[in-house]
Every structure is written in C-alpha cells, then in structure tokens.
Amino acid sequence: MAEPILEVRNLVKHYPLTQGVLFKKQIGAVKAVDGISFELHKGETLGIVGESGCGKSTLAKVLMNLERATAGEVLFKGEDISKLSGAALKAVRRNIQMVFQDPYTSLNPRMTVGDIIGEPFEIHPEVAPKGDRRKAVQDLLDVVGLNPEYINRYPHQFSGGQRQRIGIARGLALKPEIIICDEPVSALDVSVQAQVINLLEQLQGEFDLSYMFIAHDLSIVRHISDRVGVMYLGKMVEIGSDEQIYEHATHPYTQALLSAVPVPDPTGREGRERIILSGDIPSPANPPSGCRFRTRCWKAEERCSTELPLLAVPSLEGPAAHESACHFAAEREVEQSAA
Amino acid sequence: MTTVTEKADSGERLAPGTPLLEVRDLHVEFVTRDGIAKAVNGVNYSVAAGETLAVLGESGSGKSVTAQTIMGILDMPPGRVTSGEILFRGQDMLKMSNEERRKIRGRKIAMIFQDALSSLNPVLSVGYQLGEMFRVHQGASRKEAKAKAIELMDRVRIPAAAQRVNDYPHQFSGGMRQRIMIAMALALEPDLIIADEPTTALDVTVQAQVMDLLAELQAEYNMGLILITHDLGVVADVADKIAVMYAGRIVETAPVHELYASPAHPYTKGLLRSIPRLDQKGQDLYAIKGLPPNLLKVPAGCAFNPRCDIATDLCRTEIPALHQVADKDGAELAGRRSACHLWKETLHG
Amino acid sequence: MPDLIEKTADVPAQGATEPKPEKPRSLGSDAWHDLRRRPIFVISALLILLLIVIAVAPSLFTSVDPRAGDLRNHFLTKPNYGHFFQPDWFGYDGQGRSIYARVLYGARASVVVGICVTLGTTILGGIIGMFAGYFGGWADAVLSRITDVFFGIPLLLGALVILNAFSTRTVWSVVFAMTALGWTQMARVMRGAVITVKQQDYVTAAKALGAGTGRIMLKHILPNALAPVIVVATIALGGYIALEATLSFLGIGLQDPTISWGIDINSAQKVIREAPFALFFPAGMLSITVLAFIMLGDAVRDALDPKLR
C-alpha cells in the first residue's frame, strides 16, 4: 500500500457549551469529534459514512483547518498541520481542498464563474502567473466538462450539476493532493449524480488525487471508495476495505446501517431481514458512557456501559479481521444483501 | 389498544381494491416573470384502497405539484389548473366548492410533508395540535381530545406518550416529529394518505423505522397511499405500482416488480442503470447525459429526447402517447404503460 | 488530456436549463431588468430625477430670485393657477417672495441633506455593522452595545441638542447631527446581513482557499450583504428629508438665508387662515419627495428580494 499522505491521530473537536453573557462559564461540551484516528493513502478514496450528528462534517472542517482541533494531530506528509497559522497554514491549504454539499450556496452569486475559479490564483499568485490565469480558468472549465466560453456567466445561470462542476474546478485550481468531498452529490438530481461521480473518478486518475468522500448514500460510497470508515457519535466504529465493511461488517451499528438502506430492487423484499434500531441517536453533548452505541444495540451487556471499546482488529478469521470498535465484534449470521 | 376513533360520518372502512382517487389529464401551470412554466402536462394516475402508488421523479418533474393540486393546497396564483379532473370516489374535486373540498381535506385525504418541523406549529404542544383535529372536526372536549392525542402517539410508537403529550415540536427528534406528522394524518382515519418525500430529511436507520410504521398502519387501516419520492430504494421497498414522471408528464407506469425488472421507458431504464452496482466497481457509472429540462422551455416532441440514447426524428417532433405495453407475443401487460415511441425496443431490446 | 473527459454537461439539449445564450446576467442587472418593468419604480424614479434636476439647477425653471421680496405688490397674493412656470403660479408668501421659486430652490437643501446623511449613515453604520457581524464575540458585544446606546437617543431630541451647540447652522451641521445619530439603523441591518452571509458555504470555500479577512469581507460578504442595506437606505433617505424639514420647522435646523421647505412651512403656519396656499406648496413638495423615496425603496426591495427570484 502507498505511504499515508494524511494521518489523523486521536483527533478531538469539542464545542464548548457556555452560560452567561459577559462572564462565560463552560457548562459542558458538544463532543462532535471525540478521538478519531485513521490514515489516508496516496491516490486512494476513503469513504466516511454515518448519520447526521455523527461528526463527519465537523471532521471535514477540522481537517480543512476551518475549525481548530481541540486535541490530536493531523499529519500531512508527516507534518502536523492542525496547529499552523498565518503563511504556513496558507501554504498548506494548497494541498488540501474541499468540494461542498450544496452547489447553490457554495458559489458566490455576485461573482462570475471566471472570478470564482480564478480566485485561488489571486490568493496564491505563485500558482499561475497573471497573464496565464484566464487560460488556466478556461482549462479548468474544460477539465470538469463545462464549455470554456461560460467564463463570464454567473452561477444562477447554471443548473445544480453544472454548479457542482464549477465547485470542483475551484477545488482543483491549486492542484491539491487531497480533496475532501462533503456530500458532493446529495443535493443533486438522481440522474445527474452519476455524472458528477464519474467526473470525480476521472479526475482522481488524471491528477493522482486522494479523496476523503463523506456521504450518507452507502451505495455511492461503496462504488467510489477503496476503504470505508463508519462513524457514530463522534467515534469511528469500524474501518476497513469496502468489501470488509459491506460484506463482513463486525460492528452492530454498521450491520444495522447496511440493513436499513433501502435496496433499489423489489425482488425478495418480503423476505429481507432488516435490523430496525429502536430509538434515536443520543445527543453528542451528553453521549452514553462506555460504548456510544450501547443504548440502541441489541448485543449490549454490562461491560459495554463501563468499558469503552477501542478501534482494534478483533481475533476473527479472514475478511472479518479488520478494525472494529466493539467488545463483541462478529459477523452477522444471516448473509445480508449488500447495498 | 382500541382503534383511535369511530369515523364521524361514513363509518365503514373501504374494501381493498375499491377505487379511491383518479387523476385524469391534469394540467397545471405557473405564471412566472420569465413566462409560463408548464409544471404538469396531462397526468393520469389512480390509486385504490390498500394500494401504494409511488410517484417517482426528480425536482421539477411535477410530482409534488400534482399532489398539492389533489390536496387543494397549491398556491393560486401563481399556479393554475388549466384542465383535467381529480375524481375522489367518483366526484370531481376540482368542481367542488371550497367548503366541500375542506370536508375532504384531512378527513378523507391527508398529507404528510417532508419537513415535519416547519409543518408543526412551534408554539403549540404536539398534544394540542393532535387534539385540535378532534375538537374541530368532531367537537370533542379538551379532555377527550387530549386522551385521543395520547392514543394516537401510542399508535405511531412514540415512547412514553402520556408524558410527552405536552411537549413542543422542537423537543422531539426528526424521526419522532415525522411520527407526529403521521399521527396527525391518521387522526381522522382518512381513506387516502399522500406522503411527499416523507423520509428524505431523515437518517437511514430512522427512515427505515418510519417507512415500516407507515406501511404497517396503511395495511391496518386499508388506506390508499401515494408516496412521492425520488428515491429508487424506498420505492422498491414499499410500492405496489409506480408512476414515473418527467417534465410534468407520466412517462411510465408499471407494477413495482416489472418496472425494476424490465423498464419500458429510456428514462426509467437510465435511472435504474445509474445505480452503482457491485460489478461496476472501478468503472464509470452509467449516467443519463444532459440536464433536467427547463419547464419554461420544454423540448419539442418527447421532453426526454435531448438526453435519450435512442431518440429518433419522430421523438424530436411528436409527443409520444402513453402506450399500452405488451409482451413479445403482443399480449397486453396489465397496468403497464410507457410514453415512448420506442417502447418495444426499450422493453425487449 | 482534457479530451479524456466527456462533455456530459454540455450536450446542447434544446430547452435544457440554458438561459438566453451569451448574455452574462449579474444579479444586479437582473434586478435592473426587473425594476424597469415596475410602474411604481418608473414613477418614483422619474420624480426623483426631476427633483435632482431642480436641486442642481433651479434656475432652469424660474428666473426669479427666491430671496427677493416685493412687499408692495405681492404680499400674500393668491396663486394664479393659469400662469404656468410664472413667478405668481403658486402665489407670494408673507414677505412677497415667489412661492414657486422658493419651492424650487428649497429642493436643494432637502436633496443635499438627504443624500449626504444617507451616505454618511450607510458608510459609518455599514462599517460598524460589518465589523460587529463578521468578528462576532467581544467585538460584536462592544459595538452592539454602543449601537444600542445611540439607538436609545431619540433622533429629534438628540439633533436638537447637537444643533444647539452650533452658533451658525449650515447644511453641513445638520448633516453632521443627523449622521451622528442616524447610523444605528444601518449598523443593525448590516450586522444582520453579514451574519447571514458569513455562514454561506462560499465564504467557507474562500477561507479554505486561504483568503485573508480583507478579501473575504470585500469580495464575498459585502456584495452579498449590500441588498438589504440599499433598500433600507433608500427608504431612510425620504425620512431624512422629512427630518431636516422638521428641524428647520422647529427653528433648530437650517436658517435663513438658506431656503428650506421646513422654514417656509414654519412661516406659512402663522398665516394659515389668510394664505393656506403658502403652506400647501412646500408641504406638498415635501410629501411627494418623501413618498417618492419610500416607493423607490419598496420597488428596489421587491427587485432585490431573493425569495421572489
């Protein structure tokens, strides 16, 4: 396997909950990301799945240095970037870029497409000399499959899928090595999603990009990812290759998540066995003790409420032997129909 | 547990299969400052008691506008119904007085919306809002109404209903709020429920709970259900039959198994093909080319023709009728229709 | 290498979401396009245009000196409605001056005060609101409290106090007093707009690219936060003109020999029984002017309101 380009070690992001106006007193914290470690390798796609409130979007913001990590390290090629500021941070930003979820709010409506895609060059003038910028922008439009003549148009003249292409072109401008995609297709029409997924895959090959692909659509994540991490309440509960996660999940939450996904095929739907979880996701401001998932887990025992299961490889055979944070990690008996 | 309440007027539940609602050749358009947007261009569909019809389509396909027109909650202006009939148990609702329609709304046909939070009044407790249905429609006292509200919350499996009846909407999670919406829709035991993207805003594990609940209650009350969605997975899970919409028209109708097994319209086929499959790992996904149409300028002929792989000159000039679909031997397939000139090629080719 | 990529989004689909080709329409030009078709906008804009022309060059419309009184012949002469554009069209005031000429020359003070105070409050309030909204936290707490303190001072009362400190009051002292007290509304509007805009993804995207505070404020936040400020400023402009007239009426605003509708209304009220026309024309002009700006503001709001797009 290629060397890791990004290493995340024990990353924590807590948002303090305060009381009082002038003299603020901390009365607790929302534990959005609570001790996450993983690696991203060169040229690979790491999918991150999880439901709302699991901390996947916060994770993206912390990796992008849009939010300061409360603790932990983010190593880009061995250098901790989570504590950088000023010029050093600006330099590092060239290497990690982001594609946003909502193409309607991620483009400034008062700027032309040329200005939007050209802005990275204005911020980092060393990337493209002034005279070449227009050409560079047109090349980028071409790369993402838009007509280079659209350079003077405004975002509202484009459809959702086209806007997402513009957002991707902006992300590519600085020739980053890593692109974090935060739900890049969930706001798009079904018939346009496949176009954007294909584009992202083509660009990955062309520019040797590493992706962190955050999404809730499990079938798309499976299609695009080499490895998949599953998050629940600020923790990574399971991580492994796409086959390990989708076919040999050992964490009960992953199993429930996979079984809950509606399968776009009505054959045999009556006989499909589904784990219906009871209850809701607890608040990240007040997570359960021990294992975060125990309040909804059918396997939970005394031990789960006292002892936090660590993300480790359980002593199982074959593809089930991948990192899973469960005291009772085991494959499900019934062969689940994968999404 | 007893059923929630005796029906105030008509009493008996309908037998399964009794036709409930039929939409005939409905046309709806919107007047915008850039011109007239034809949102619905001749939609036909029907649903019977105990049956689930899924209306599948992307944004702008007219699926929600059709539902809003059925409910009589379409904003007019800018919207206007230019022609068509909406028959509820044989009576055309478009010809009814406002008073008559109001009697049907809520009592006979209820609607569930995507965004439960904005559909509930934030300053009234959920118990009050649920009870309001009984006070207004059945003249129940405050105490009776509250008891019925608790009963309803029990029915949609909200834990500790008796304690939570006085809570306000923001105190419930998204999944619980959607249950409250379902409880509200069920309150007067309607014959038909229209659910507009009921689980789109919910997480998958919660979505599964809510869809299960909805299907179970539907079977119990023998209601008709129109499920409006863009999610091919949800449709495959619960629908009996499907109507696929594109640019304000029905492009294909079929029973659920047949639609997924052998689509008879290139748009449906394209949608199904673009779902990532295991064996496509590392390859390009099939993608329908081009963009969804602008309703101000729907392409001439078949609206899908610019995006279609097999479009011919006929497709560019003539709007296809909703053809009855037949198998290779020419035997008609029940409930299957396709608005494609080349449905034979699409189905068999 | 770009050839590897299919131009999937470029299929020249007839009727796909392509607006009129090769006409880049910014939101501003869209709004303009929309405004031109609104009768309220056209009427109010024409009125305001006319007012500005009168303010800049009143002598185009009359050759009479508005300060020259002829007590012998014209003291409180009734209007002669048939004499269009003649000195006696609107009659003569208590000092025998042509009311027509005075109404025309009075526009200048109103327009200058209105525009300058609006510019002043928008810039001052805009900057304060921008900083409070963008930086939040302590900066917001301090700036917002200062805004609240100023907001608590009644505009009229405060202006009376400030203007009393001037021995001779010119247009500029009135502008100063009104700006010093009137910026709070703009600061609040701007702060609210900035807080909304700064949460948008495109601001996050600019930060992710490494954009500095100045660039984010000027290129991303300001252009998108400006619309509500423009609307409020347009409506407020009419209010400022009315306030100037009020101050002058009370004798605490502009002073003779400056010509102001407020001063004329004040002197006319003493002879209201004998010569109601002396009150009617300056007051009428004032009302029309204020109304025109309020209508303009309404039309601009409708055009800029993103909810209607």
Image (cartoon, coloured by chain):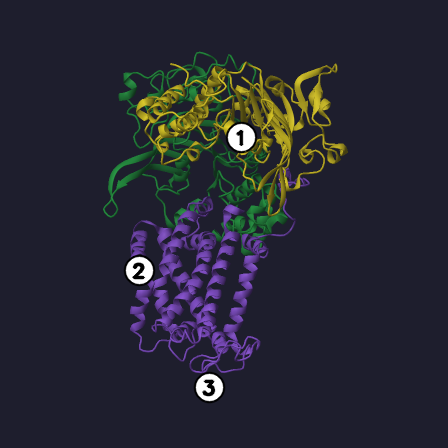
Tell me which residue sits at (26%, 46%) in the image: A21
Residue A37 percent location from the top left of the image: 37, 31
Residue under disc 3 on the same chain as residue under disc 2: yes
Q: Amino acid at mark 2?
A: Phe
Can residue B187 be seen by looking at this rendering?
yes
Q: Which chain is yellow?
A: B
B14 or C48: nearer the eye?
Answer: B14
| Helix, strand or loop under label 1 | helix
Residue B188 percent location from the top left of the image: 45, 23
Q: CA distance from mark 3 to mark 2?
A: 46 Å
Q: Which chain is green?
A: A
Q: Chain of mark 3?
A: C
| Helix, strand or loop under label 3 | loop
Reading the image, the residue beneath label 1 is B101
Answer with the quarter of the image where residue B302 lies.
top right
Can residue A125 be seen by looking at this rendering?
no
3 or 2: tag closer to the N-terminus: 3
Q: Amino acid at mark 3?
A: Asp
Q: Chain of mark 2?
A: C
Q: Amino acid at mark 1?
A: Arg
Q: Which mark is residue C150?
A: 2
Q: Which mark is residue A78?
A: none
Q: Which chain is purple?
A: C
Q: Is residue A78 above or below residue C20?
A: above
Reading the image, the residue beneath label 3 is C70
